Image (spheres, rainbow, N blue to C red):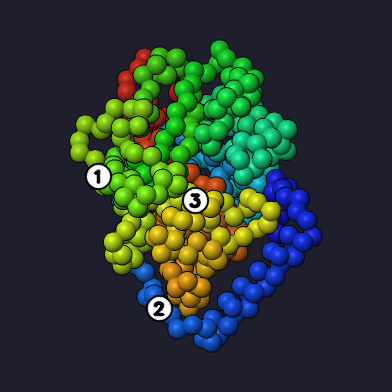
Amino acid sequence: MSASSHHQKWQISETEREIYRQRSQASSLAKAKAMRGEGKQPIHPINQPRLNPETLMPQQPNNGWKTLSLFSGGGGLDLGFEQAGYTHVASYDILPEAGITLHQNRPQWQIFAGETGDVTKIDWRPYRGMVDVIQGGPPCQPFSIAGRQKGQDDSRDMFPQFIRAILEIEPQVFIAENVPALVGKKFSQYVREIIEQPLAGKYHWTKFILQAPDFGIPQVRQRVFFVGFRDAKIAAKYQPPKPTHTWEHLAKNQRQQGDKSSGARQPVQLNLFSAAPKPLNLCMGVREALGLPDIGFDTLAPTIRSALTGPRHTTSVLSSVSAQKTWEKLQIWQNGVAVNREKARLFVAENGHFRLSVADCAIIQGFPDAWQIHGAVYMALGQIGNAVPPPLAYHIALSVANLLRMRNGGLETGFLR
């Protein structure tokens, strides 16, 4: 059970609870049997992923800009900004497990997690003059369908805290990420009252939606970004990152199978921004990315859900019935993710399909193998599913850094006053 006060269980009947309990017990018994070598004979070798997300975000030299991370989670934004050349100031997250993840991967970072990572209790003013960029993804549950879309009536709504941090620190730039539903009609008043009005006259910002496969991430995932600048002249020159990859070939595979259910949209043509000046790279399908054999069909993975959302914690990445159809065509078992690839191999799925491991899910989200996610499987999947894909964060970070590097009133690198 999550220690976070921001996790909210669904209200389900005792009958439904008993069904979940029986399924869980049956799965646990089958898993224990497999780990003892008494299960089905393994049929899949341990996979060697072909996609190395580090190639999607080559390390840039230090650019002199300092960044503070809020709602850091598994570190997707933090890693992307580091690869883009930013200097880490501190990370904050309410989950103790997220703090361990960050500390294990970057022991030199300053990390606040659990009670010390509770942003509602932090006086941000001491950071004034120390931070160029504030970045973070406030919890999306208040705006997502899975989270019941209660908006500001949801205790997990942390956007006001993100805005408070901006106003107290007064950074040159802020970057916030969330689900596209936040900029839909349902939450237009929320955006106006909670985001626009407090920042009016102080920051000049834009919002836009990016798709993960446009940047080489083999997963259907769309996210909205808010990017704001204190300097109006700089803000006027800002352009969101342009696609680096195309996935038309994968969308075509999906259409040929007669399956429009994955949520994937045709690339490039639907992107709001002009095409990149050089030929786009091909985004890998999920089977190719994970190093699985060619079965004559490959496409983007459906959106990986956070295992911390729903009526119970789970080790499934399944987000919808339509997504299940896509996973089945991919011959990938989306339930019962294993803690590692060896145990995934031993625990043969009911239908013989390839079983995912935590490391595989991390690759699909754009985390390199070297980035280890701490916690029980459900907690690791929660951190992965809630994270901004690092390569996506990387290109957002570059789009800001490239603009700040330009001479504009004598402003080049480092803290801007």
Q: Residues under labels 1 and 2: Cα distance?
A: 33 Å
Considering only order in the chain, which callout, 3 or 1, is on the residue closer to the N terminus?
Answer: 1
Q: Residues within 10 Å of mark 3 (few under 14, many from 20)?
A: some
Establish if 178 lies above or below 272.
below
Q: Determine whether the residue tagged by mark 1 lies in a helix, strand or loop.
A: strand
Instruction: Give amino acid for label 1.
Output: Asn
Task: Choose mark 1 or mark 2, whichever is in front.
Answer: 2
Task: Choose mark 3 or mark 2, whichever is in front.
Answer: 3
Residue 124 appearing in the image: no
Please tell me how many numbered marks the rendered image carries: 3
The residue depicted at 70 percent of the width and 45 percent of the height is: 6
Res 285 → quadrant: bottom left
Q: Which residue is mark 1?
A: 281
Establish if 361 lies above or below 191.
below
The dot on residue 64 is none
Considering only order in the chain, which callout, 2 or 1, is on the residue closer to the N terminus?
Answer: 2
| Lateral position of residue 194 relative to residue 384, left or right | right
Q: Which residue is mark 3?
A: 322
The residue depicted at 61 percent of the width and 40 percent of the height is: 145
Q: Which residue is mark 2?
A: 43
Establish if 397 lies above or below 76.
above
| Lateral position of residue 164 relative to residue 282, left or right | right
Res 122 → quadrant: top right
Q: Determine whether the residue tagged by mark 2 lies in a helix, strand or loop.
A: loop
- Residue 382 position, x and y percent, is 58, 53
Considering only order in the chain, which callout, 2 or 3, is on the residue closer to the N terminus?
Answer: 2
Residue 148 appearing in the image: yes
- Residue 198 position, x and y percent, is 62, 19
